[in-house]
Amino acid sequence: MKTPSSLIEMKRKGEKIAALTAYDYPTAQILSLSGIDVALVGDSLGMVKLGYESTLPVSMEEMIHHVKAVKRGISGPLLVADMPYLSYEIELKEALKNAGRLIKEGGAQAVKIEGGEALVPVVKELLKIHIPVMGHLGLTPQSLNRLGGYKVQGRDLNGAKKILEDAKRLEKAGIFALVLECVPADLAKKITAAVSIPTIGIGAGPFCDGQILVSDDLWGLGEGPALKFVKRYANLREIMTESARRYSQEVRKGVFPASEHSFSSKG
């Protein structure tokens, strides 16, 4: 079973970290059989599983529900849970309570929070109650209204400097790993060299210590073209749609169920 310390050791040895999102029991089982190091129950579930337009509506109850499902199927990868919007930003006491619920009720091994310098006190307090914290800088989806949408961050000198400084502050506060989302590859390379904790990129180029993708994007389950930083390794949406179409056609024609799918009486 991977731990936060395992990831830090992987960086020290120069071993790349492979991470994917997981939202349910069967996906957790698949990741456990696939050599994945980190399973993240991301608040992206709001968009890919619950049909929300963004991650903002996702509640603590929804996160705990999905974390518990993943926990029942995981064996090997480090299980990290996103803290949803407004579960940690306002009251420190509420942040500790909500993170504790993801650990105690959900079964997560660590939590992930979005943001830089302002979140340093939260990180420090979570560590006091023995909850490992993963950071998240760059494009932080919970801040999409302030950022003006889903845009690459850190392209200008001031923006890049701020992200680098925040990475160092979060490392000093005690995070064990840092997600860098949608930042220029050269900035991600600089941050990766500047901190002793592993960086995990998504749309941050090849120089991070690891990579993460939304599993539904990897498998081609979503609609429309893939985002620039996504590589589709399968087209399961097409396969699943075609299999459902064949099933409906066979039911209407009376082809399914056939005799081999039916039971007979005794005698």
Image (spheres, rainbow, N blue to C red):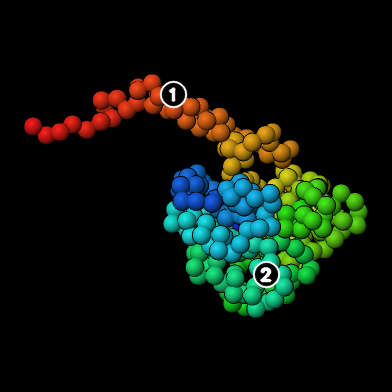
Residue assigned mark 2: 88
Q: State which quadrant residue 109 falls in.
A: bottom right
Residue 265: mark in rendering: none
Q: Tell whether 266 sits left or right of 204.
A: left
Q: Residue 125's x, y, as percent? A: 66, 77
The residue located at (62%, 47%) in the rendering is 51
Secondary structure under tag 2 reads: loop
What amino acid type should be assigned to the residue bearing mark 1? Gln
**Measured along the vertical axis of the image, is residue 145 above or below residue 117?**
above
Which label lies toward us, 1 or 2?
Answer: 1
Residue assigned mark 1: 249
> From this viewpoint, is residue 83 visible?
yes
Secondary structure under tag 1 reads: helix
The residue located at (77%, 48%) in the rendering is 150
Q: State which quadrant residue 143 falls in.
A: bottom right
Q: Residue 171's x, y, as percent? A: 72, 66
> From this viewpoint, is residue 168 visible?
no
136 or 62: nearer the eye? 62
Q: Quadrant of the C terminus?
A: top left
Total label count?
2
The residue located at (65%, 73%) in the rendering is 95
Label 1, residues with CA under 10 Å away: few <14, some 14-19, many ≥20:
few
148 or 206: nearer the eye? 148
Q: Residue 215's x, y, as percent? A: 58, 44
The residue located at (57%, 31%) in the rendering is 235
